[in-house]
Image (cartoon, rainbow, N blue to C red):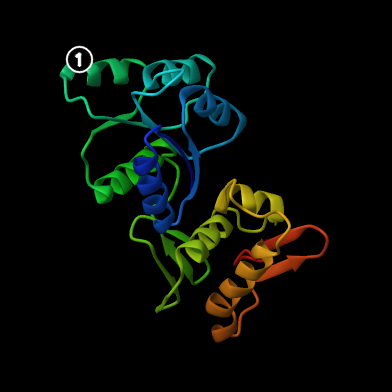
Amino acid sequence: MRVLVVEDETPMAGLLERALREEGHAVDVAADGPEGLWLATENAYGAIVLDVTLPGLDGFQLCRRLRESGRWVPVLMLTARDAVGDRVRGLDAGADDYLVKPFSLLELAARLRALARRDDRSRPVILAEGNLKLDPAAKRAWRGDTELRLSPREFSLLDLFLRHPGHVLTRSQIIEEVWDFAYDGGSNVVDQYVNYLRRKIDVPFGRHDIETVRGMGYRLHRADGG
């Protein structure tokens, strides 16, 4: 999932970025309200982690503007304030959940997973195509009865393929979903990670499910041949 973190305190922003990347998310960071609003309106995010106290535009205003413009990406608000009135104000502005500092990074990750599930109720708990299965919440994947040992980035890549079986995913689409603005567009990192993934989910099992579509990108074959 691609996540936007809007946080003006540099140490906190760095901590959140590292923690979310370790969870396998692609992360963009904005240091003030106007930058956060611009990124949130220009890109498709799976969730936004939004601090309340921001320069230029506070979190309440930013969230309200997103909702007024018809953008319903899940928003998790962060604040050092613990007053009930502030929590109510945040929810009234359109936030989906609220977390008071200090908080556990494990709780933050769990709440983001819950928001993602709530945002797409048709999303299956377990993603599967043939005997290839992935549990997004538990961060586990299997080929048949064999559990696969995947890095966070490999896991995110497999998650993306399993959400779009039979569809060609261009390198740009993969970058958009699995990487972030820190990606070096001149490198062949997508091709490298597709090869890493093939070595774990295809090669040991004599399969060729991830197909290279020349000049376009990659496709995960559907189990029914479609």
Rendered location of residue 13, percent (x, y): 39, 41
The crowding category of the residue bearing disc 1, from other C-alpha atoms within 10 Å (few below 14, some 14 to 19, many at least 20), is few
| Amino acid marked by disc 1 | Gly
Q: Residue at x 45, y 46 (%)?
A: 123
**Residue that label 1 marks:** 85
Considering every residue shown, the one lying at the far front of the view is 10
174, above or below 74, in the image = below
**Number of marks present in the image shown:** 1
Apparent side of residue 29 relative to residue 111 in the rendered image (left or right) = right
86, above or below 168, in the image = above
Would residue 176 be seen by someone viewing this image from the given angle?
yes
**Foreground residue, 64 or 201?**
64
Considering every residue shown, the one lying at the far right of the view is 215
Rendered location of residue 73, percent (x, y): 47, 31
Q: Residue at x 44, y 54 (%)?
A: 21
Rendered location of residue 83, percent (x, y): 16, 20
Rendered location of residue 138, percent (x, y): 33, 60
Would residue 220 be seen by someone viewing this image from the given angle?
no
Q: Residue at x 40, y 79 (%)?
A: 145
Considering every residue shown, the one lying at the far left of the view is 83
Secondary structure type for disc 1: helix
Q: Residue at x 70, y 55 (%)?
A: 171
Apparent side of residue 216 relative to residue 137 in the rendered image (left or right) = right
Where the C terminus falls, by quadrant? bottom right
Q: Quadrant of residue 59?
A: top left
**Foreground residue, 32 or 197?**
32
203, above or below 27, in the image = below
**Foreground residue, 224 or 159?**
159
